[in-house]
Amino acid sequence: MSKITNKSSQLYWASGIVSICGIIFEVLFGALGSYILGDGVKQYTITISLFLTGMGIGASLSERVVKHLITRFIVIELMIGIIGGISSFAVFGITSIAGEESTAIFLYSIILIVGGLTGLELPILIRKANEIGVEMNKSTARVLFSDYAGGLVGGLLFAFYLRPEFGLVKSAFLVALINILVAFWMIISFRKEIVRRSIYIGAASFALILMIVGVLFGEEIAFSFEQRLYKDPIIFSEETAYQRIVLTKEQGDLRLYLNGQLQFSSSDEHRYHETLVHVPMAASRDRNNVLILGGGDGLAVRELLKYDEVDSITVVDLDPRMVDIARTNHMVVELNQHAFEDKRVQVVNADAFKFMENESERFDVIISDLPDPNNESLNKLYTWEFYSMLRNHLKSDGAMMVQATSPVFATEAYWTISKTIGETGLYTTNMHVDIPSFGNWGFVLATRTKIDSEDLKIRVKTDYLTSAMIPSLTAFGKDEDSTITQDGEKIKLEPNTLIRPNLIEKYENAWQQY
């Protein structure tokens, strides 16, 4: 009886451990899709759907597995380990060589395969537990408990430890090592049942060596793949708890990318940041208290510090690591001119939506320098609800400036953002400026009272923007203005809200063409 208890206990522990690995692979695949293909909600939805479908197929196929249960389980663990382990590495390689379409096909296939193999595991373990003498109802309940509990541990482990500490490539190899070690454990524990044991030991040893090599060198090789995704040499890259930060540099041009999206080029970022900052500063009667949402690179802060009358600048950026880099990386520090060292600057690392919900102070100027709305978490920062909170925190004679993507490349998205801000009761003034590294880029100036762009005067030193230029920024061509037509009829744009997040689809559809 003690032998039966010991064997069944090992099976339950194995079930919990492989469940941890399974859920980590599932969320890792979702993170890969989000990073490479964009639209996190869409990619996680596809990942979960495909993974569960694969598990269903695997569970169905498990009906045919009635003999040699433990050796079948070992083979499955080795297959999950090898396929899952090389998944991230291979995705970066395929993306650099064949592009996003091929990457999507490959990644979705991997998800389905690993899901299928995961679906095979549990029925086999349940049958094995029953085979060694445990009642079917008890074996099923205990294996399922181990599986579900392991799922919770795996999800938390990936979110709070593996991804921020090891990144996507190394995490995959590390988790694969656990699958392979479970296979070794089963070989040793059930060695008397395994015919030709040396074959399984050899296969597991090969897989183990392959994963160790992956842990040691896979990330470095994947880095060379990632380099092909960027125009210039990568000089810094880091996976944080919130995003992947990449800096590139070529012939003096420093560029920052977040999750693969260009944030600035040092050669022309002054055009963007001077428009973003100095226009609302000119539109506001007072300029004492300023709020920046985003702006962790410190470049908007640099422009604000040109004003002697500014007493306080609050920067709300979700990722503390981005601000750390802006404070310590000598190239970024040189560009932002030590902006975060000024005593007037206060940094708050928080979600902008939650910050505004809890903040009681009102501001003279609010600057929204947030990433484009390419996923659900960012979309909420472009909703009527969010802009209503910004309006409530804006002083009666203050001004707000919102970066609002490109009116040329994403025309409907730009004017939807403008309409959403206008629906809060604020008066909007639409502007755009040519930025060579980005193209034509749009902004929305919002105030409580109507303003005339002719009256806006720049009173600090700039490298690009002049007072005389400001009215010209409000002129839009026929193919980029608010009269958006389809089949000869004007499209009625609806505001973007939390309940009806229509902006994401407009944004994704527009940028697919570029």
Image (cartoon, grey):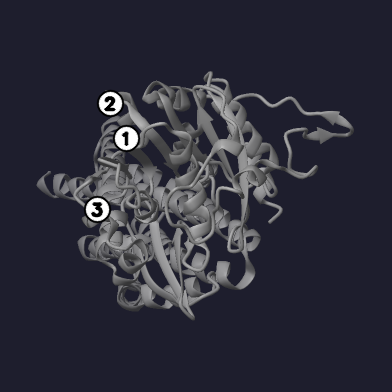
Residue nearer the viewer, 304 or 455: 455
Amino acid on which disc 2 is placed: Glu
Q: Residue furthest left?
A: 2
Residue nearer the viewer, 256 or 393: 393
Residue 178: quarter of image = bottom left
Kindly identify the residue that appears in the image at 51 percent across and 75 percent down. 232
Q: Is residue 226 above or below residue 444?
A: below
In the rendered structure, find residue 356 and report the number of the disc placed on it: none
Residue 470, given in percent of the width and then of the height, sits at 59, 45
Label 2 or label 3, whichever comes before in sequence order: 3
Q: Secondary structure at mark 3?
A: helix
Between the residue at mark 2 and the residue at mark 1, the CA separation in whole angstroms equals 57 Å
Q: Give the residue at mark 2.
A: 361
In the rendered structure, find residue 161 and report the number of the disc placed on it: 3
Label 1 or label 3, whichever comes before in sequence order: 1
Instruction: Evaluate whether residue 130 shows in this view.
Output: no
Q: Give the residue at mark 1.
A: 140
Kindly identify the residue that appears in the image at 49 percent across and 60 percent down. 269
Amino acid on which disc 3 is placed: Tyr
Between the residue at mark 1 and the residue at mark 3, the CA separation in whole angstroms equals 31 Å
Q: Nearer the viewer, mark 2 or mark 1?
A: 2
- In the rendered view, does 329 fall on the left or right side of 52? left
Q: Is residue 368 above or below residue 384?
A: below
